[in-house]
Image (cartoon, rainbow, N blue to C red):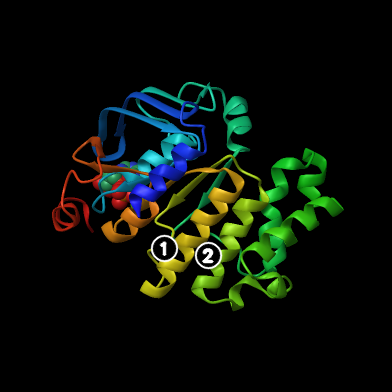
Amino acid sequence: MRDQNIARAQQAGSETETVISIRNLSHTYKRGNLTVFKDVNLQVRAGENLVLLGPSGGGKSTLLRCINRLVKASSGTIHVFGTEVVASSLHEVRKVRRHIGMVFQNFNLIDRISVLDNVLIGRLGYLSTYRSVLGLYHKEDIAEAMHALDRVSLADFAHQLAMNLSGGQRQRVAIARAMAQRPKLLLADEPVSNLDPLLEREILALLRDICREDGITSITSLHDVTLAEEFATQLVGVRDHKVTPIEPGEFDHDKLQEVYGA
Ligand SMILES: Nc1ncnc2c1ncn2[C@@H]1O[C@H](COP(=O)(O)OP(=O)(O)O)[C@@H](O)[C@H]1O
Ligand SMILES: [Mg+2]
């Protein structure tokens, strides 16, 4: 499966284009004086589905948050689409964030508004400040949001309150919100860890198919090795202050689960 994934990424013919380049990244949280990374280097090429594998507390979320500068890394550089984000102004960071869709473990939906209104949040970056403050979406934004809902098979739920949906449906709404943004990069932080095993595969397959169709590069943190192997074109382990590439065949499955599993 993973060989097929890798072949697909290479077939895309875009393997030379680097989307993310991380150099000598270190991060210490001031609170607790806790060092999460030391001198991490990592490249992600266009079309890759990179999976971060690692035990709880290993630093997966911190790494994802450094990439979109929700966390400002202590030192080192991260280039995203050619822009260095660690030392950039917030203005520059915002321009980069426009191209980054996010999917979270806890879905991060607003419960008391409709499914469609949740997905429209993905369009906010395309509105003028005036329109975004007032929520004055264009017809095209609504069409884009409905198209995204259709792709996750939830168009019929557009006018329901988000709180009335099941867990799997809620994560599909969150995916539609990210897709409505037309991102070039998707960051997904444990997108399936609140879902039951049957849904995990379904949601990951949906994410993979959408990324493939739209040519979106993705970084996803997971803690299940089987799912990671099915989904990833590139696997890295995140633990002990390090981010280490895991080559296909380098470890056997059980060993991987032991070292990186939850
Ligand atoms: N805002 C924060 N302040 C201080 N320590 C944090 C903060 N966020 C995470 N940590 C710590 O950093 C380490 C890595 O956490 P995290 O990146 O969430 O790992 P993972 O996502 O792999 O579970 C953990 O020890 C965690 O307690
Ligand atoms: Mg985490």
Closest to the observer, 74 or 249: 249
Q: Is residue 259 above or below residue 22?
A: below
Q: Tell me the quarter of the image containing the C terminus.
A: bottom left
> Which residue occupies 78% across, 52% down?
141
Q: Residue at x 29, y 60 (%)?
A: 226
Residue at image x 47%, y 21%?
87
In the image, taking residue 8 as reference, residue 163 lies left or right, namely right
**Tag of residue 50:** none
Q: Position of residue 245 (x, y in %)?
A: 26, 37
Q: Amino acid at mark 1?
A: Val
Q: Secondary structure at mark 1?
A: loop
Residue denoted by label 2: 171
Q: Which residue is mark 1?
A: 192
Q: Which of disc 1 and disc 2 is earlier in sequence? A: 2
The amino acid pointed to by label 2 is Gln
89, 226: nearer the viewer = 226
Residue 8, percent from left and from top: 46, 44
* Residue 178 seen in the figure: yes
- Tell me the quarter of the picture where residue 126 sits: top right
Quadrant housing residue 91:
top right
Can residue 106 be spotted in the picture? no
Tag 2–tag 1 contact (CB < 8 Å): yes
